[in-house]
Amino acid sequence: MSPIEGLAAALVLVNVALVALRSVWNYPFALVAVTLYAFVFFEAKLYSDMLLQGFFFALNLYGWAAWTRARDEGGVPVRWMTGRARRGWALATIAAWAGWSFAMDRYTDAVAPWIDGAIAMLSITAQWLLARRRVESWFLWILVDLIAVPLFAARGLYATSAVYVVLLGLSIDGLIQWRRAAATGRVAL
């Protein structure tokens, strides 16, 4: 494990724990973590995950601004998506995964373009829904974690794989917390 991977892993754990608690302070930790992970994934030839970090950086800036505005207006509400929205996001995610993974398989030397592409496209959808404060984001994060653990371990990224095991637990907790918040109408502080 490189020192960069270790630091990035620690920052991700702090970030996700704060997200599960619906704290706006998750965002500074996320911005540093994704920057460091871009370097880690480049070295591991996991290009989809490397490029994903740039997307995460931009979306974390958006989420930080959105959560701060909502907090200033009385709290960060947590809600469920409509059935129609779920279907639309599912179809878009599947289409993006197929197109992205095909391109990574065909045009790069990526080691696991289809699995890595699944992680990337599911993560994009999950992060977008998280920034919009939708409960469903946690179901997607759980799926991402289940796929990522064996991939990262196979690439020798043991600290990152271990982080994703912890993230799985945090994602389950986040789902429980956000389901309660959506049911009771509670908002984040």
Image: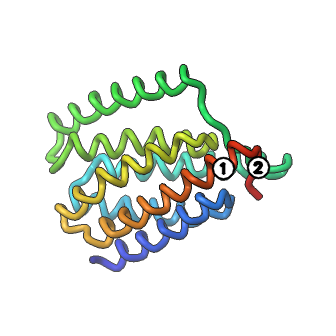
The kind of residue tagged 1 is: Arg
Q: Which of the two residues, 2 or 83, is positioned nearer the viewer here?
A: 83
Compared to residue 133, the image places residue 19 above or below, namely below
Mark 1 or 2: in front is 1
Q: Name the element at disc 1.
A: helix
Q: Which of the two residues, 28 or 183, is positioned nearer the viewer here?
A: 183
Dot 1 and dot 2 residues touching (CB under 8 Å): yes
Q: Which of the two residues, 43 or 86, is positioned nearer the viewer here?
A: 86
Residue 180, disc: 1
Say which quarter of the image contains residue 103.
top left
Quadrant containing the C terminus in the rendered view: bottom right
Residue 83: % across, % down: 55, 23
Q: Which residue is mark 2?
A: 186
Determine the residue located farthest toward the bottom in the rendered image.
Answer: 3
Residue 15: % across, % down: 55, 64
Residue 54: % across, % down: 44, 50
Q: Residues within 10 Å of mark 1 (few under 14, many from 20)?
A: some
Quadrant containing the N terminus in the rendered view: bottom left
Q: Residues within 10 Å of mark 2 (few under 14, many from 20)?
A: some
What colour-coding does the image apply?
A: rainbow
Q: Which of the two residues, 187 or 56, is positioned nearer the viewer here?
A: 187
The residue shown at (51%, 27%) is: 86
Residue 30 located left or right of residue 158: right
The residue shown at (21%, 40%) is: 114
The kind of residue tagged 2 is: Arg
The residue shown at (47%, 23%) is: 87
Looking at the rendered structure, the number of numbered marks drawn on it comes to 2
Q: Name the element at disc 2.
A: loop
Residue 77: % across, % down: 73, 44
Q: How far apart, in angstroms, are the residues tagged by discs 1 and 2?
A: 8 Å
Residue 2 located left or right of residue 176: left
